[in-house]
Image (cartoon, helix red, strand yellow):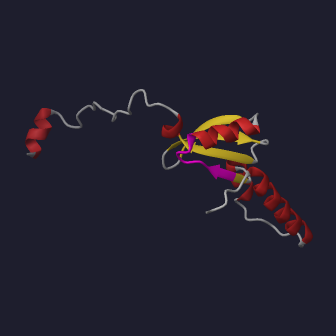
């Protein structure tokens, strides 16, 4: 049986990583790292369709900000700890679809008059 990791287990792993990085000489991170951290935080947990797990985690964390985001499919994100931690779940797992998206319908003016079209045909 596979052991389920808890938030406390993860925190212990983060402490080990922090100690390892602080013991090593400082080095420059890739240029994208600041933007990535501002957008995604330091850690992101994807709950996919696990609504109960997502809600349980949000309640355990308490305060944070909710955002909607679409990359491959619509998601709900909950950012905690000043954005350092992000929880994500597919929007369809958490929300009820009220009205499906409709394809756009356009009406465009003709490029040519009927007489001009007749000359081409």
Q: Quadrant of residue 33?
A: bottom right
Q: Quadrant of residue 118?
A: top left
Which quarter shows the N terminus? bottom right
| Foreground pick, 15 / 111 | 15
Report whether 87 appears left or right of 91. Answer: right
Image vertical order of residue 66 relative to residue 120, above or below: above
Image vertical order of residue 95 relative to residue 14, above or below: above
| Foreground pick, 17 / 72 | 17
Counting the numbered discs, the total is 0
Residue under the image location 64 percent in, 37 percent down: 55
Report whether 54 appears left or right of 81. Answer: left
| Foreground pick, 86 / 49 | 49
Residue under the image location 51 percent in, 39 percent down: 93
Q: Quadrant of residue 15?
A: bottom right
x then y, percent, for residue 110: 22, 34
Q: Does residue 68 belong to the magenta stretch?
A: no
| Foreground pick, 40 / 10 | 10
Q: Which residues are magenta?
A: 44-51
Report whether 70 appears left or right of 38. Answer: left
Q: Residue furthest top?
A: 98
Image vertical order of residue 28 relative to residue 6, above or below: below
Q: Residue furthest bottom?
A: 25
x then y, percent, for residue 103: 33, 35
Image vertical order of residue 36 relative to residue 105, above or below: below
Which quarter shows the C terminus? top left
x then y, percent, for residue 13: 79, 61
x then y, percent, for residue 22: 90, 66
Q: Residue furthest front?
A: 1
């Amino acid at each position: 049986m596979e052991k389920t990791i808890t938030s406390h287990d993860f925190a212990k792993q983060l402490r080990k990583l922090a100690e390892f990085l602080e013991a090593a000489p400082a080095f420059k991170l890739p240029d994208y790292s600041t933007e990535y951290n501002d957008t995604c935080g330091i850690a992101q947990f994807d709950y996919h369709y696990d609504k109960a797990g997502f809600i349980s985690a949000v309640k355990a964390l308490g305060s944070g900000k909710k955002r909607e985001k679409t990359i491959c499919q619509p998601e709900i994100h909950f950012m905690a700890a000043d954005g350092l931690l992000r929880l994500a779940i597919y929007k369809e797992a958490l929300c009820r679809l009220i009205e499906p998206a409709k394809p756009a319908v356009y009406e465009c003016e003709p490029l040519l008059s009927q007489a001009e079209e007749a000359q081409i045909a």
